[in-house]
C-alpha cells in the first residue's frame, strides 16, 4: 500500500524547463560544468541535498520568533535544549555550517603528522584534517566499493583493518576516530549500531576519542531501524540516543538532517575541558558561543528541524522517495549503487557508459547529457571530483565513477522522480552515443567547482 508524505503543500515555487536549444547554449556558456549554471536554467535540481530542503510552517514561524541578541539569545537556549533532547550530549555550540564546525574542532584534536581514521571522509572534512597537518585515512568495508553488493551497511568501518592500522602505526600516531553517518562518499550508506559499538571498543582499547560526522544522523537511524536485527522495535529517538552515546562528540552540517538551509553544530558528550577550548576557538572563527555564525532565527529553525527530522513518518517518506527513484531506474535497466542510500541515488556511470574511460569522466559526461535531455542537474562523483596526484600531476582513477542524483528534503514529488527516471532511461537507450569530456582549464585545488570542460 502507498503511504503518502505526512505533510501537504502550503507554498509553491514555480520552476521552468527552458527549451533544448537554450539548454545547449547555457551549457556551452557554463563550459560544460554544471556548477556554473544559473539555477533558473535548471528544471529539477539534484545537485545536492545540502541546504536545499523545504522548511515546515513551524520553522517559518520560528524565524519570526528568532532572538537576535548577540549574547544569551533565547534562540540559542532553545537550540541547546533541542540538541540535548535529541542527542543526549551535554555541550553544544552552533557553527555557520559543517566545515565551520570542523575548522573549530579539528585543530584542538590533531597534532601534525597524526592520522584521523574513519569510514570514508567527506571532502571538506578531509581538507580540514589535512590543513591541520593530519592525514585522513579511509577504512570502510570493502563491500562499499562493489555497487551490486547488497550489504545493508556499506558505510561500516572495517574493524580488522582499523585495528591493524592502529597497531602498525601506534595509537600515538592517531588523533581520533571519525565515523560519518550516513557515509556520504560511499553513496549515503548507513553504519550499523553494532559496527559503532565495535569502533567504540577499539577506541577504548587504544584510548582514542571517537567522533561522529553526523550530517545525516536521522537517515542513518532509520536504516538501523529497518535493517538491523534487534532494532525493529526501537524508536528513531532511541536509536539516535544510542548512536551518540557511543561517541565522545560530533560535528554536524545542519544543512542536511537539521532541515535548515544553513547551520552547523559541534557536540561534546561530557568533556568540559574540550568544550571550553572549543568555545574559546569558536570566537575568532565563527563568533560568540551563543550564535556561532548563525542568526537567532537560524538557530530557532534548527531547534525545530532537529525535532521534526526524528519523526519516523517523515523519514519513511524521505528515504522512501530515494528508494522509489532507485527502483524506477533499476526497472529501466540502469546500474545503480545498491541498496540505495539515504539522500541520493548513485548511478554507476562506469557501467552505464563502458565506452568512456575514466580520463574522459563518464560521470560528468552523463551529467551533461541528462541536463541536455531534460534540464535535470546532477553531479559527478568520480575521477573528475578526485583530481590529480599533487606530487605527479597525474589524473587519479576513482574506484567508482558515479552520477549522483541527490534529493532535496521535502521539495520534489514522486512525479518529479518519474520524470527524472524517464529522462535517464531515454539517455540509457542511446547510451553508446554519449560522448566523453576533456578538461580545458582547471584550478589547482577543488577543480570540480570551477574547471572548464569541452565535449570530445
Ligand atoms: C558528511 C559530510 N560532512 C561534512 C560536510 C560539510 O558540511 P557543509 O557543507 O555544511 O560545510 C558535508 C557536506 O556535504 C557532508 O556531507
Image: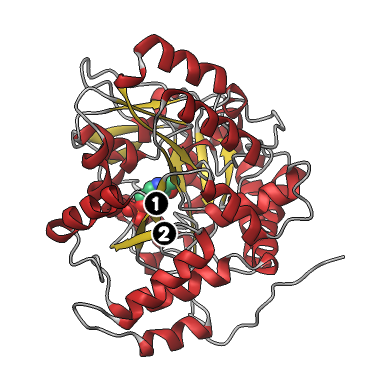
Query: Relative to 401, is 64 above or below?
Result: below
Quarter of the figure with residue 234: bottom right
Q: Quadrant of the C terminus?
A: top left
Q: Secondary structure at mark 2?
A: loop
Residue extending furthest right? 1
Quarter of the figure with residue 438: top left
Question: Residue 15 placed where, x, y %?
Answer: 48, 74
Q: Residue 220, which numbered label?
A: none
Query: Relative to 432, is 239 above or below?
Result: below
Q: Is residue 74 visible?
A: yes
Residue beneath label 2, please? 90
Q: Residues within 10 Å of mark 1 (few under 14, many from 20)?
A: few
- Residue depicted at 29% across the width and 33% down the height: 439
| Residue 359 located left or right of residue 222 | left
Q: Quadrant of the N terminus?
A: bottom right
Q: Residues within 10 Å of mark 2 (few under 14, many from 20)?
A: some
Question: Residue 147 placed where, x, y %?
Answer: 63, 30
Question: Residue 29 placed where, x, y %?
Answer: 28, 54
- Residue depicted at 42% across the width and 51% down the height: 269
Residue beneath label 1, please? 270
Q: Is residue 410 visible?
A: no
Q: Earlier in the sequence, mark 2 or mark 1?
A: 2
| Residue 409 located left or right of residue 148 | left
Residue toward you, 413 or 249: 249
- Residue depicted at 56% across the width and 23% down the height: 159
Could you give the CA–CA distance between mark 2 and mark 1, rounded to whole angstroms? 6 Å
Question: Residue 297 placed where, x, y %?
Answer: 33, 80
Q: Secondary structure at mark 1?
A: loop
Query: Relative to 102, is 43 above or below?
Result: below
Residue toward you, 413 or 295: 295
Q: Are marks 2 and 1 in contact (CB under 8 Å)?
A: yes
Amino acid at each position: 500500500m502507498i503511504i503518502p508524505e505526512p505533510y501537504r503543500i502550503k507554498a509553491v515555487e514555480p520552476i521552468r524547463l527552458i527549451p533544448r536549444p537554450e539548454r545547449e547554449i547555457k551549457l556551452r556558456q557554463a563550459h560544460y560544468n554544471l556548477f556554473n549554471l544559473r539555477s533558473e536554467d535548471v528544471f529539477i535540481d539534484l545537485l545536492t541535498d545540502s541546504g536545499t530542503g523545504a522548511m515546515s510552517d513551524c520553522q517559518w514561524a520560528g524565524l519570526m520568533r528568532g532572538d537576535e541578541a548577540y549574547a544569551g539569545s533565547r534562540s540559542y537556549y532553545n537550540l541547546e535544549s533541542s540538541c540535548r533532547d535529541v542527542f543526549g550530549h551535554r555541550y553544544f555550540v552552533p557553527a555557520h555550517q559543517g566545515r565551520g564546525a570542523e575548522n573549530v574542532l579539528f585543530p584542538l584534536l590533531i597534532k601534525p603528522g597524526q592520522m584521523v581514521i574513519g569510514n570514508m571522509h567527506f571532502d571538506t572534512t578531509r581538507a580540514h584534517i589535512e590543513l591541520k597537518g593530519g592525514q585522513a585515512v579511509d577504512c570502510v568495508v570493502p563491500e562499499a566499493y562493489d555497487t551490486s553488493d547488497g550489504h545493508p551497511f556499506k558505510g561500516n568501518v572495517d574493524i580488522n583493518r582499523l585495528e591493524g592500522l592502529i597497531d602498525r602505526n601506534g595509537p600515538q600516531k592517531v588523533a581520533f576516530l571519525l565515523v560519518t553517518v550516513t557515509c556520504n562518499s560511499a553513496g549515503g550508506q548507513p553504519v550499523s549500531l553494532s559496527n559503532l559499538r565495535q569502533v567504540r571498543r577499539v577506541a577504548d582499547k587504544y584510548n582514542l576519542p571517537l567522533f561522529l560526522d553526523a550530517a545525516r544522523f536521522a537517515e542513518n537511524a532509520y536504516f538501523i531501524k529497518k535493517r538491523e536485527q534487534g532494532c525493529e522495535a526501537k524508536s528513531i529517538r532511541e536509536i539516535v540516543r544510542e548512536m551518540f552515546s557511543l561517541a565522545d562528540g560530533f560535528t554536524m552540517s545542519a544543512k542536511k538532517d537539521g532541515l535548515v538551509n544553513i547551520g552547523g553544530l559541534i557536540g561534546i558528550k561530557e568533556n568540559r575541558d574540550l568544550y571550553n577550548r572549543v568555545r574559546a576557538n569558536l570566537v575568532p572563527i565563527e563568533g560568540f558561543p551563543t550564535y556561532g555564525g548563525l542568526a537567532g532565527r537560524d538557530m530557532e529553525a534548527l531547534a525545530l528541524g532537529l525535532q521534526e527530522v526524528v519523526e519516523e513518518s517523515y523519514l519513511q517518506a524521505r528515504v522512501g522517495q530515494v528508494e522509489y527513484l532507485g527502483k524506477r531506474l533499476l526497472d529501466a535497466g540502469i546500474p545503480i549503487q545498491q541498496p540505495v542510500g539515504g539522500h541520493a541515488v548513485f548511478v554507476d556511470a562506469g557501467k552505464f557508459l563502458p565506452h568512456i574511460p575514466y580520463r574522459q569522466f563518464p560521470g560528468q559526461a552523463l551529467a551533461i547529457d541528462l541536463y541536455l535531455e531534460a534540464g535535470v542537474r546532477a553531479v559527478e562523483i568520480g575521477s573528475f571530483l578526485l583530481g590529480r596526484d599533487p606530487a605527479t600531476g597525474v589524473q587519479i582513477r576513482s574506484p567508482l565513477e558515479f552520477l549522483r542524483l541527490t534529493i532535496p528534503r521535502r521539495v520534489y514529488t514522486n512525479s518529479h522522480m518519474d520524470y527524472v527516471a524517464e529522462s535517464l532511461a531515454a539517455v540509457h537507450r542511446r547510451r553508446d552515443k554519449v560522448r566523453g569530456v576533456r578538461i580545458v582549464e582547471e584550478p589547482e585545488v577543488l577543480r570540480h567547482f570551477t574547471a572548464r570542460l569541452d565535449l570530445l
